[in-house]
Structures are given as C-alpha cells and as structure tokens.
Image (spheres, helix red, strand yellow):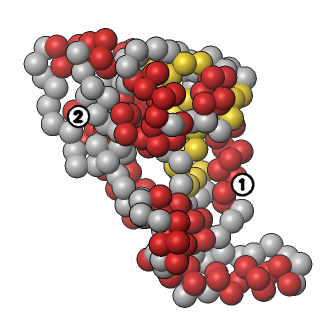
Amino acid sequence: MSELKYCRVEDEGRLRIVTLNRPEVMNALHSEAHFELEKVWDEFAANPDLWVAIVTGAGDRAFSAGNDLKVQAAGKRGPTPPSGFAGLTLRFNLDKPLIAAVNGIAMGGGFEIALACDLVVAAENAVFALPEPRVGLVAGAGGVHRLPRMIGQKQALGMILTGRRVSAAEGRTLGFVNEVVPQGEALAGAKRWAAQILECSPLAVRASKQCVYAGLDEPTLETAITTMYPSQQRNRDSQDYIEGPKAFAEKRKPNWQNR
C-alpha cells in the first residue's frame, strides 16, 4: 500500500494488524484518517490471503479517543467516507472477522470502532464511554444503535444518557467485552483469539458471521433458521466443505483452500 500517515499496517500470514497511529492525540481520528483507513479495510476485504484482522491503538494510553474535537472546533471536520468512522462503522458487508484489541481509552468514536468489531479483547486499564451528549453530540457512528442490541436497552441507556465511563471488567460483565487481559497484553490476547479463528475454515467462519448478523435482522427465529444466506451457500458449494469432514475422518488437520 502507499505510505500511511495515520495508521500502521502489518500482515502476519493470514492476519492483518491495523494500529491507529496518532498517539499524540490519543489516536483521535479526523476526516483524512477515516479515508486512509477506508482504503486499508477495502484492501483487507479484497485480499484472499488475509482472513482475520485486529485493530488496536498506538501507545499505552489509548485505543482511540474518538472524534478529533479540536479539528471539529476549528471548523475543519470534513466528510466521513461511506464506510463510516475509521472506515469501519458503516461497513456492513465485511464477512471476515474483526477483533478490537483495546489497550486503553476507547471513548466516543473509539468505542464505536470496538463495537463495530466482532470480538473485543480489553486490557484491564481500558475505559469505555459514549460521552457525546456531554459535548452536545450524539454517538451516531453506531454507538446508540449497536450498544443496546448487545447489552440490552436499560444497560445501554445507562451509558448513553450519562456518558459514564465503564471499566474493562464492567464491560465484560455487561457483555460487550470478550476477555480482559493484563495491561499491555491486549494485542497478544487478540492474537490468541485470531489464532483460534484461523484454525477454522475461512469460508465457514464468514458464513457463520453473515448468518449471525443477517439472522438477527429477520422477523422471526424460524425465518432466520430456514433462510440460506449467500455466504452459507458459497460454503456449501466449496471444496473446504468436503475437506473438513475428510480431514476429521483421516485424523489430520484440514488444509483449507478458501474455495
């Protein structure tokens, strides 16, 4: 990829690690950063050799403090790409798994980035909040919609209407954090989850993710279960659909071809 100014990208085999890289402002993001990240995620989505991604923040203080309010206050906010905040919050067609490695503060848009991911691994010093109403804003990059779907209406409103801060431990109890790890180990923890995902069929993983999200939008459980979703059909038609049971029968590790 061309030179990146606001993030770092490292590919380790099938895994992509994207690090939000504005530590001087606690990895807060502005318009230019959103468009740069959109290209990063577009490339990840299109690359058949990349199966899982992790997003984290540079430094030891913050995952992301969200929207760069100083830029907005100066009247230089600029547009947001169609894929949303950080190129992620409106990216509804990505079936590859995303993991947030939250290494510190995840406020506002930063929390919304984490909510847009499929799994959240948080260091014990991580702090989550949607403080937008405290500065006259609304958590419109998904926070006011994703959070109540994840943790229930009353618990979500308790965070949204007050802007209160929630620890990693409370986030685990509420249900939006998968695992809490020691300070400094968020990325390592996320890599462990990624390694487990990478043991599975990539097509089956993507089909499973699509089934979950699409199924939640169906009007009834029966409709969700009886619908054949596109990625599910693609998985059934694949070579890997045969390879998995064959490898099990032969007592060996499957050789996933992703086709």
Residue 229 in view: yes
Measured from the top left, where is residue 31 in percent x and y? 22, 33
**Mark number, residue 32:** 2
Among the 4 quarters of the image, the one containing residue 243: bottom right
Q: Which mark is in front, 2 or 1?
A: 1
In this rendering, would 170 be left or right of 160? right
In which image quadrant can residue 242 be found? bottom right
- Determine contact: label 2, label 1, CB under 8 Å: no
Q: Which residue is mark 1?
A: 196
The crowd level at tag 2 (other Cα within 10 Å; few <14, some 14-19, many 20+) is some
Q: Secondary structure at mark 1?
A: helix
Residue at the left extreme of this rendering: 75
* Residue 39 vertical placement versus 224 (above, below): above
Q: Nearer the viewer, residue 189 or 126?
A: 126
Distance CA(mark 2)–CA(mark 1): 34 Å
Q: Nearer the viewer, residue 25 or 108?
A: 108
Q: Label 1: few (<14), some or many (≥20) within 10 Å?
A: few
Q: Is residue 121 left or right of residue 88?
A: right
